[in-house]
Image (cartoon, coloured by chain):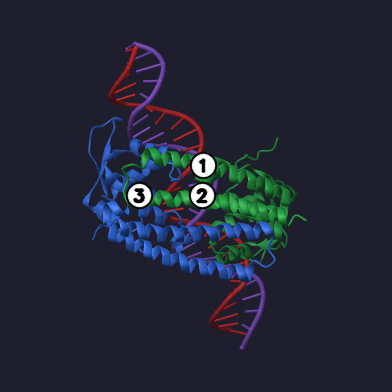
Chain colours: A blue, B green, C purple, D red
Amino acid sequence: MIKTKPRGLSLLECALLALLRQAPSSGYDLRKVFAETPFVHFSDSPGAVYPALRRLERRGLIASLGSGGGRRRRSQRLTARGQRALRLWLRQPVTRADLAQARDAPMLRFAFMEEVLGREACALFLRQYDGALAAYVRELELFARENLKQASLSGRLAFDAGLESFRARRQWARRALRQMKEREI
Amino acid sequence: MIKTKPRGLSLLECALLALLRQAPSSGYDLRKVFAETPFVHFSDSPGAVYPALRRLERRGLIASLGSGGGRRRRSQRLTARGQRALRLWLRQPVTRADLAQARDAPMLRFAFMEEVLGREACALFLRQYDGALAAYVRELELFARENLKQASLSGRLAFDAGLESFRARRQWARRALRQMKEREI
DNA sequence: GGATACATGTAAGATGTTACATGATTGT
DNA sequence: ACAATCATGTAACATCTTACATGTATCC
């Protein structure tokens, strides 16, 4: 028995795994990706990235390439265990909690999915995602009917904004599925 | 000079202020709101809510109603300072960071805005929000043209999902502004 | 050899999560 | 009196933010 606690990985840690799979990189490289890529909300602060990398290293999911002391550039690569952890994360089903709380997690997974799991997994994901969205939209509509009667106009509109985000995302999922199939040839 | 550090309020703390303005409530009440309201992502865990309430109390933004020791129900109400803090939060301009990082903050503010600041402030907000979204969408489109050439299909689609969310939100903002004006009579 | 950019790290503090503990109230 | 529910709180832990500290390479 190993002493590793089976705590889950944070979204940041998963993103780091996915980026390191594409190419071994240093913490500095990864921070630049976060700094320069819009609308992915990860912090490029050293106090977030370097500790996360060392957590991944401690778990054996990544390993240093260039060694040496001091403060020289130190690239990290994914280990076999890291590969497995990444695939596991990418293959998770889409849950209601993913929609309600960790709203960006599904899309982050999808962004890296094709490279790691291939087109079929992407198509499966899109169908699951659409289904989960459909159920969640129904739930929200029901809530609106029962609880938004005497809300202010701005309150109702704010709720609508959320609802329409999910509806738009459903449309996107359908379109994405079509495109995946078209280019399957 | 008072010793209060001018640290900002967390989104949770702002939400608590807004809810307490509607009606004095206990921590338990507030937790139930978070537990039962879908797609507002606040935790209903006691370890999040009670410490946040005590921080607000320490700052003089809320105050206890029912006193008494033990573990009896203790409702909190907004103080005059709390009112001012709430209005200040609601009146903040929409920034790029609100769109890129704190994505839910603007809508949370809008939801409570009419009750506290009135229709005109809502209309101003919607125009600002639309403008900020327009600029951000242009920025994202530029990024896509320059950096998404050799991305995988799922990678490009994931980016599109984000883009379309922002476009859909712009449409919503325009529609909301129309509705605000229609019912202004 | 001095300035500048590259690169890694840490310390302090805020916040949130999970799990547990415990006091009050209500119904039977 | 007992259980169930209401209601508040705390301890341990993980993560992230901000700000600072420090070493290395490169260019002139």
The residue at the point 29 percent across, 32 percent down is A73
Q: Position of residue A85 (x, y in %)?
A: 28, 55
The residue at the point 34 percent across, 46 percent down is A16
Element class at badge 2: helix
Q: Which sits in the foreground, B1 or A97?
A: A97
Label pair 2/1, CB-CB below 8 angstroms = yes
Residue flagged by tag 3: what amino acid is it? Gly
Position of residue B61 in the picture relative to residue C2 (left or right): right
- CA distance for labels 3 and 2: 18 Å
- Is the same chain shared between marks 3 and 1? yes
Residue flagged by tag 1: what amino acid is it? Tyr
Position of residue D6 in the picture relative to residue B84 (left or right): left
Chain ID for label 2? B
Residue flagged by tag 2: what amino acid is it? Phe
Q: Is residue A5 visible?
A: no
Label pair 3/1, CB-CB below 8 angstroms = no
Chain ID for label 1? B
The residue where tag 3 is placed is B155
- Is the same chain shared between marks 3 and 2? yes
